[in-house]
Amino acid sequence: MFNDFKLMEGRPVYIQLKEYLKRMITNGHLLEHQKLPSTRELSSLLSISRNTVLTAYADLEQEGLIYAVKGKGNFVSHVETFKSPSIQLNWTEKINEQTFLADELDLMKHGVRWNNKMISFNSIAPDEKLFDVENFKRAFLNRMSIEGDIVLNYGYAKGYKPLIEYLLHYMEIKGVDIRNKDVLITNGFTEGLDILLSSLNKKNGRVICENPTHHSALKVFRLHGYEIDGIEMDYDGVNVSKLEKILSKKEYDFAYLIPSYHNPTGIVTSSEKRKEIMDLFSAYQLPIVEDGFNEELRYSGSHLAPLAAFAGLGNNVIYISSFSKILFPGLRVGWILADKDLIYYLESMKRARTIHTSTLDQAVLYQYLNDGYFEKYIKKAKSVYKKKYELAVHYCKKFIPFKRITGDGGLHLFIELENNIDSRKLLEKCYQKGVVFSPGNVFYTDSSGGNHTLRLGFSRLKEREIIQGIKIIGDTLKNNFGG
């Protein structure tokens, strides 16, 4: 006995010993009133210090798992170890249709599997090598020293007040009229959209959006039972004439739009078209859910105000965003900016769902933003990503025969292949050569669309990997598909 005790690095030895003995007792390997080895014997047997054994025994006694008899030693207490008859349920039969749909739409499970030895253009997450870890540590220590006892306790469903005030000011700088507006903090963009859809009346059960569009948003719409109509995109944003035509024929509950560094096309909607869109939806009295995706990653040109800014004092735009794609995805902090009355109700839905977003995460993010670290970080990030962006564009034009390539900045490019070449078949061939990318059809509102398109995310790749990967894609197109 005790010969299967193995030590792990990085965890206090007395805790490992306590957990080991506790498992032995609760599993019935050590019986009631059985005498345990003396502290000296066990320390010698396991080659650990006697103080370690003393501490472990003291903790076990405090938990009521062992008892000490003066002059005789330590003994196992009475512990209920009865087990019910074991049964095996078929959980697949108990899963509902919405969960089966979530599984079907889960690209992490059912997409192309790849390993870190491959060149992956799948991700559009920020490059972790750019993460400003030292200043984030400073922000953490500063906030903990100021109010550590508060941020480690329960918080408010609406969010951490200093961060809410910061974000209202942040949006005001973007040109948004924040009078009668408010902010709800969420666990990233996806939870924000899910909370919103859970709170709105589904009168028509239809949503209108750009086509293609953000796969995660499509997934949430489908899980909520919405029909989705997609409008094709021009070089400067959604095709407004086709948008107007379909609005005159069908009624919708709301529109979902990504005007900046659109995912997946990378197109930035022009100011002129943003005004046309706002005028059109104002005429139809239709709400707009604006995805503030990667708005900060503009490498050149003038600032473009979000749709929420064009709305002025109007309240039909619901702006949802996060810093996940440009700062620290692991924090999972996003926000909804909307009319105060709407935020009032969304706050209750948030509280019912997840109580609140981590106060610690919100507080540290606030400190980091407030200390001015974000502005320095974004300058550095934009410089690095701009170089990768220009490199990717150059080598796509050099090696890949395409019908159309879009992407005005951001962290990805979208390619429409010549001769309607199937991007999934191309992916199969490239996978064999150690290169993967996102086939474009997963971003389309209709299953038949986008079969000849693909998205290339370059943010996390080294420059040599970008060049090598694009060359392999181009060579594969030419050698296997006559491109």
Image: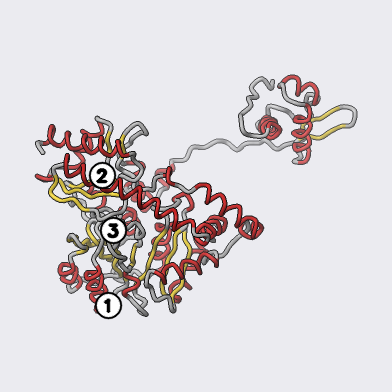
Given the image, on which type of amino acid does mark 3 rest?
Answer: Ser
Identify the element where label 3 is drawn: loop
Quadrant location of the N terminus? Answer: top right
Based on the displayed image, in which of its 4 quarters is residue 482 positioned?
top left
Identify the element where label 1 is drawn: helix
Distance between the alpha carbons at the discs numbered 2 and 1: 41 Å
Based on the displayed image, in which of its 4 quarters is residue 276 positioned?
bottom left
Distance between the alpha carbons at the discs numbered 3 and 2: 15 Å
| Residue 122, x across and y down, in percent | 31, 43
Left/right placement of residue 379 relative to residue 274 reads: right
For disc 1, the marked residue is 282
Sooner in the amino-acid sequence: mark 2 or mark 1: 1
Badge 3 density bin: few <14, some 14–19, many ≥20, Cα 10 Å: few
Badge 1 density bin: few <14, some 14–19, many ≥20, Cα 10 Å: some
Q: What colour scheme does the image use?
A: secondary structure
Please give the label number shown on residue 300: 3
Please give the label number shown on residue 391: 2
Sooner in the amino-acid sequence: mark 1 or mark 3: 1
Identify the element where label 2 is drawn: helix
Q: Is residue 368 above or below residue 54?
A: below
Left/right placement of residue 376 relative to residue 440 reads: right
Q: Is residue 373 above or below residue 458?
A: below
Q: Are marks 1 and 3 in contact (CB under 8 Å)?
A: no
Of badges 1 and 3, the one in the foreground is: 3
Task: Please tell me which residue lies in front, 80 or 22.
Answer: 22
Q: Are marks 2 and 1 in contact (CB under 8 Å)?
A: no
| Residue 306, x across and y down, in percent | 33, 68
| Residue 64, x across and y down, in percent | 76, 40
Task: Please tell me which residue lies in front, 304 or 77.
Answer: 304
Residue displayed at 22% across by 47% down: 393
Task: Please tell me which residue lies in front, 1 or 144.
Answer: 144
